[in-house]
């Protein structure tokens, strides 16, 4: 274990911090990446979730099939996807063990800091959601996290290895051994929470999306009352890191979110909106992109207005519209290793009381003071913290939080 970490640290230093430098023949003195202990984080399939939920009510498999049919869900389809996922997970495990690697398989709810400390590397077996979960508990920037897409037909898996390695994982292992890959450090977001009435206990949303009633009940649970004193108001560094994004907003989506925001230690500004999204370069392809992207229809309408206002005479060809749309949308995406954040105000309300000087922009630090009624601060769509009136969060990046991932060629 110790010799492994020493070799890995040396190997990574050669690759360069935050860079993506090819490794291989020119690194003949390196043996590549060869872990001895690997934790495989296994996602909960939809079939497993439905089965667990109704099994508690004493229902058997036939009852489950009937209930799913009433809901419009295809029991056989869910079972088939579950079988595909399970088969691909077993392929990964068998491939690792055939190389003499010690493997610990954990379900999402069993994944904890002790497992992370035990492992030399983490493999997420699922899709992007499982990769985000696996990454959030890894605080050592030299401990690689590798995603394997276990159901490529139903999952994009942007953060995972190319889909060809789902069924040929031994080939991926051999490339790692030979150094035929690239390291990529993905910058992440850290959060400092302070203020009155704060609650440092997270609510895990990975197993399912809680209803408003469930969410409110979880946040008001008596066991977190010890964290709600003014004497313990922070700032507290929260024990999670955001690989994709942080979202702040009211739990009830139809209610406007009221807060104050300061960007890069600038003046505080009162805002009302549908919420605030702060993303990394990794997350700039995800929710943030869909918040800000423009459709070709919108671009065409704007160009028509511009032509009319300025009395311009040029044809609005489909090629031009698509080119402008593509260039604009591409400008919303930036590299995962860039140490900057992109904030987006969703549907800002502007009047004589509230303003939004910038609907989005790049930043190195964002502070938000909540004036909300029943709000959440959600990290990577899976971990939620209460964020109500009086709570203050500082959102920033630190080089020590970079996540080490692997890039294999197609």
Image (cartoon, rainbow, N blue to C red):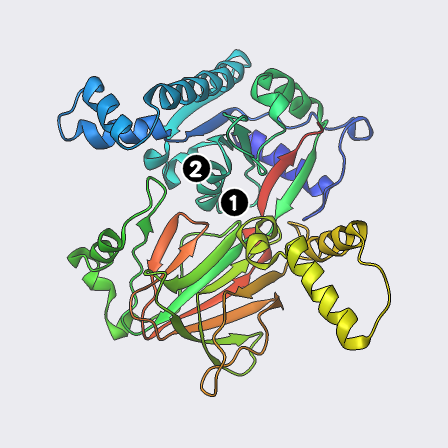
In the image, what residue occupies the spot 16% across and 24% down? 59
Q: Is residue 17 left or right of residue 271?
A: right
Q: According to the image, label 1 marks what residue?
A: 140
Q: Is residue 296 above or below residue 230?
A: above
The residue drawn where x is 69% and y is 66% is 302
Residue depicted at 29% across the width and 56% down the height? 201
Q: Is residue 325 left or right of residue 166?
A: right
Asked which quadrant contains residue 357, the reply is: bottom right
Q: Which SS class for mark 1?
A: loop
In this image, 231 relative to 363: left or right? left
Q: Looking at the picture, how far across and down is residue 289, in whole percent?
A: 59, 53
Q: Residues within 10 Å of mark 2 (few under 14, many from 20)?
A: many
Q: Position of residue 332 (x, y in %)?
A: 66, 57
Side of 214 where 11 appears, left or right: right
Is residue 338 in view? no
Q: Are marks 1 and 2 in contact (CB under 8 Å)?
A: yes
Q: Residue lying at the far bottom in this picture: please name it.
A: 352
Residue at the right extreme? 313
Which residue is more in the foreground, 131 or 21?
131
Q: Tell me if residue 255 comes above or below residue 60 in the rendering.
A: below
The location of residue 116, given as percent across then percent down, is 43, 37
Which residue in the structure is indicated by mark 2? Answer: 116
């Amino acid at each position: 274990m110790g010799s492994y970490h020493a070799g890995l640290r040396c190997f990574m230093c050669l690759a360069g911090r935050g860079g993506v430098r090819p490794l291989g023949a020119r690194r003949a003195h390196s043996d590549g990446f060869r872990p001895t202990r690997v934790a495989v984080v296994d996602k909960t399939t939809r079939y497993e979730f439905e089965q667990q939920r109704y099994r508690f009510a004493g229902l058997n498999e036939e009852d489950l099939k009937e209930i799913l049919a009433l809901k419009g869900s295809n029991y056989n389809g869910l079972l088939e996807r579950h079988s595909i996922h399970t088969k691909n997970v077993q392929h990964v495990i068998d491939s690792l063990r055939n190389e003499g690697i010690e493997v610990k398989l954990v379900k999402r709810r069993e994944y904890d800091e002790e497992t992370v400390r035990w492992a030399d590397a983490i493999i997420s077996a699922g899709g992007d959601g499982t990769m985000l979960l696996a990454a959030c508990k890894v605080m050592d920037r030299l401990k690689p996290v590798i995603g394997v897409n276990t159901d490529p037909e139903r999952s994009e898996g942007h953060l995972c290895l190319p889909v060809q390695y789902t069924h040929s994982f031994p080939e991926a292992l051999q490339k790692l051994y030979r150094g035929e890959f690239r390291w990529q450090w993905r910058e992440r977001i850290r959060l400092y929470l302070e203020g009155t009435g704060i609650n440092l206990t997270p609510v895990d949303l990975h197993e399912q999306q809680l209803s408003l009633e469930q969410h409110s009940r979880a946040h008001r649970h008596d066991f977190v009352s010890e964290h709600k004193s003014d004497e313990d108001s922070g700032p507290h560094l929260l024990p999670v890191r955001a690989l994709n994004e942080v979202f702040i907003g009211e739990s009830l989506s139809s209610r406007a979110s009221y807060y104050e925001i300061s960007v890069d230690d600038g003046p505080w500004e009162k805002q009302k909106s549908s919420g605030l999204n702060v993303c990394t370069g990794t997350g700039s392809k995800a929710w943030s992109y869909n918040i800000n992207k423009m459709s070709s229809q919108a671009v065409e309408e704007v160009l028509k207005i511009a032509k009319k206002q300025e009395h311009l005479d040029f044809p609005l060809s489909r090629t031009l519209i698509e080119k402008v749309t593509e260039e604009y949308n591409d400008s919303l995406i930036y590299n995962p290793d860039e140490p900057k954040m992109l904030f987006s105000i969703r549907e800002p309300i502007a009047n004589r009381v509230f303003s939004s000087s910038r609907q989005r922009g790049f930043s190195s630090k964002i502070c938000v003071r909540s004036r909300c009624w029943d709000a959440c601060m959600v990290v990577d769509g899976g971990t939620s913290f209460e964020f109500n009136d009086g709570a203050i969060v500082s959102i920033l990046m630190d080089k020590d939080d970079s996540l080490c991932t692997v890039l294999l060629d197609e």
